[in-house]
Amino acid sequence: MAAVSSHAGRAQRYSPRPLTDGERWTAEALGRLRHRRYVPHAWLAFLRDSLQRSQSTRHARPVIARQACGWGAAGAGAWTLACAAARGHEDVRPRPVAGLLWWLLVWQMLDWHLGMAESGDGRPRERLSPADAITLARFWLVGRRAARDRAADRRLRRAAALNGGAPLARMTAILAQ
């Protein structure tokens, strides 16, 4: 095992198991950011290092990178279809650009975090899991707020509560394939 820095060592104290490579990298990066007192050049270095790590992850694990790209495209397509379906309905006023910009940010976040897709014992996963799909679906639904339909939001929350989240589970199972 590689030497553990003081930042990773501090993080290790709070973990009941050895830190994975992704957790160790994160502890180091956040430790450097804190050590540099969060000044603008520290943030730039943090973002540069994060982007370099995500690029190396995409090259080292092309299967998960393609899957993430597919999920991102599917989310953008679903938002576009939802906006098209809502045209002509007075009770819903979709905002396609706002929703797509939100989804672009979510997609970028997924891409930056692919290096953290590890099993509990630290082995890199080759594919995103159904749990990842559920998390992304929840982020996708946040973009739904751009549609300005409060009554539908209440109905959606009520239906999800009554069904125990079953529709969301079905949707995410399809996305996970």
Image: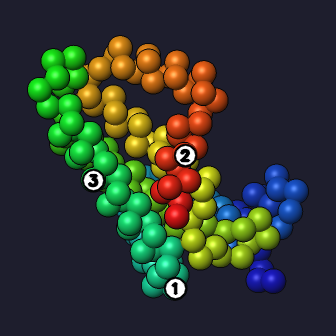
Question: In screen coordinates, is 17 left or right of 126?
Answer: right
Question: In screen coordinates, is 150 left or right of 7?
Answer: left
Task: First in sequence, mark 1 or 3: give its number.
Answer: 1
Q: Amino acid at mark 1?
A: Ala
Q: How is the image coloured?
A: rainbow
Mark nearest the camera among 1 and 3 is 3
Q: Which residue is mark 2?
A: 170
Residue at 56% from the left image edge and 65% from the top image edge: 128
One can see residue 46 in this view? no
Cα distance in 3D space between marks 2 and 1: 31 Å
Vertical relation: 134 (above or below) 158: below
SS under mark 1: helix
Please identify the residue farthest to the left as the structure is shown. 88
Q: Which residue is mark 1?
A: 60
Residue 168 on image: x %, y %:
53, 40
Mark nearest the camera among 2 and 1 is 2
Choose between 145 and 168: the one closer to the eye.
168
Q: Which residue is mark 3?
A: 77
- Marks counted in the figure total 3
Q: Amino acid at mark 2?
A: Arg
One can see residue 69 in this view? yes
Q: Residues within 10 Å of mark 2 (few under 14, many from 20)?
A: few
